[in-house]
Image (cartoon, rainbow, N blue to C red):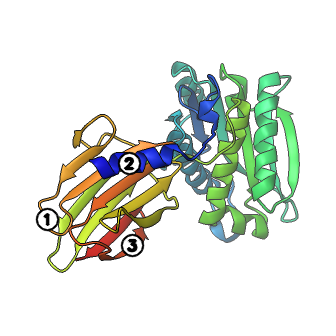
Amino acid sequence: MGALMMFLLLLAMVPAFSAANVGAVQTNLSGYAICVDAGHGGKDPGAIGAKGVKEKDINLAIALKVAKLLEEDGAKVILTRDGDYFVTLSGRVQIANSHHCDIFISIHANSGPSSASGFEVYHYYGSYRGNLLATYVDQEIAKLIPLKNRGVKEAGFYVIKYTHMPAILIETGFVTNSYDASILTNENYQWKYAYAVLHGVQRYFGVPVHDPVPTVTGIRFADHGGYFRVVVDLSHSTRYETFYYYYGYYLVIEVPNATLENLGWSSDGTWQYTETGSSSVPYIYATEYGETVYVVLVLSSPYSDYRSFTLENPYRIVVDIYP
C-alpha cells in the first residue's frame, strides 16, 4: 500500500479547480424531475413524410435519447411513453402532473409543404419560465443541428397548456421536407438533438453546461492463461489513459471526469481493492480522486506488455496484460 499512498500524494500536489469546489453550486441535474413526452404513438402515427417516415418513430427515438442523457446527468426522468403505443393528451398531462415534474418537454416533428423546413420551440402563451426554457433549448439546437431556426413561439397546445410546470414543445423539423427528414432519421443527429436539449435544460436550471459524467459501474477480470484481461464497465463512452507507475510494477488506467461506484471489494477508506487469484496480476486497486477514477493493476513482472481498447453498447475499457 505504501507506493499507492505515494501515488495519491503525488496527485495531491497537482493543483485542481472545478465547479465542485465552489460553495453549493450544483454541478448536475440531480434532484430535478423531468417529464419527456414522445408525441403520438401506436394507432396515431403523427405526420407522414417522405418515403413513409412516421413522426411517431422520430419522436420516440429522440425522446429516449433525451431521457438517457438527462438520467446520466442525475435527473429523474418520467416518460409518457417508452414504446410504440397510444397515450391520450390528457393521459400525458396526468403523468407529468401526478409526478410533480419540474419541467415538461414534448418532442414532435412538423409537416407542411415540401419547401417548409426547420425547427421551432413552443411554450404556452405568456409563460415566462416556459419562454426561458424554450429559448435555451432553441439556442442549443441551433448550435448542433444544420436546419433553419424558425425560433421560439407561443401556442396553446394541450400538453403545454394543462401541465402544471414550465413546458415546451419542440418541432424538430419537417418530415415532409426530404432534407429535414434525412436529418431527423439519422441517429447521429438524433443524439445531437438530445445533447442540445440536455444543455438547454442545464442552462435553465443554472447548471454548468456539460456532457454527463461517466460512472465506473464495475471492474471484472479473468486469467486466460496466455493473458490476463481486465474489463472496466462505464455508464457511457469517455476518454481514458494508461501508463506505468512505480518502476513498471503498476499499470494505471486513468478515467478523467468520472465517478466510481462501490465495487463490493475490500476498502481501506481510500482505495477499493481485491485479490485476483492470478500470479500475473495478483491485486487490483481502484479509487476516485479529484474527479478522476484510477484503476491500478499490480503486475508481478515490471513493464508487462499490454493492449488496451474499448467496446461499445455497453461501453467498456478492456486491458489485456501479457506476462
| Residue 275: x %, y % from top left | 16, 53
| Residue 146: x %, y % from top left | 80, 63
- 107 left or right of 299? right
What residue would you read off at disc 1? 278
Answer with mark 1 or mark 2, whichever residue precedes in sequence.
2
The alpha-carbon separation of the residues under discs 3 and 1 comes to 19 Å
| Residue 238: x %, y % from top left | 51, 58
Locate the C terminus by quadrant: bottom left
Q: Secondary structure at mark 3?
A: strand
Q: Secondary structure at mark 1?
A: loop
Point out the frontmost of discs 3 and 1: 1
| Residue 139: x %, y % from top left | 81, 46
Q: What residue lies at 78% left-to-right and 36% top-to-bottom?
A: 134
Q: Secondary structure at mark 2?
A: helix
- 74 left or right of 154? left
Quick one: 280 or 100, which is closer to the camera? 280
Answer with mark 2 or mark 3, whichever residue precedes in sequence.
2
Q: Is residue 156 visible?
A: no
What residue would you read off at disc 2? 6
- Decide: is 91 above or below 142: above
Amino acid residing under circle 2:
Met
Q: Are marks 1 and 2 in contact (CB under 8 Å)?
A: no
What residue would you read off at disc 3? 308
- Disc 3 residue crowd, few under 14, some 14–19, many 20+, Cα 10 Å: some
Quadrant of residue 202 in the image? top right
Point out the frontmost of discs 2 and 3: 2
Amino acid residing under circle 1:
Ser
Amino acid residing under circle 3:
Ser
Quadrant of residue 206 in the image? top right
Q: Is residue 205 visible?
A: yes
- Decide: is 287 above or below 165: below
- Decide: is 10 above or below 323: above
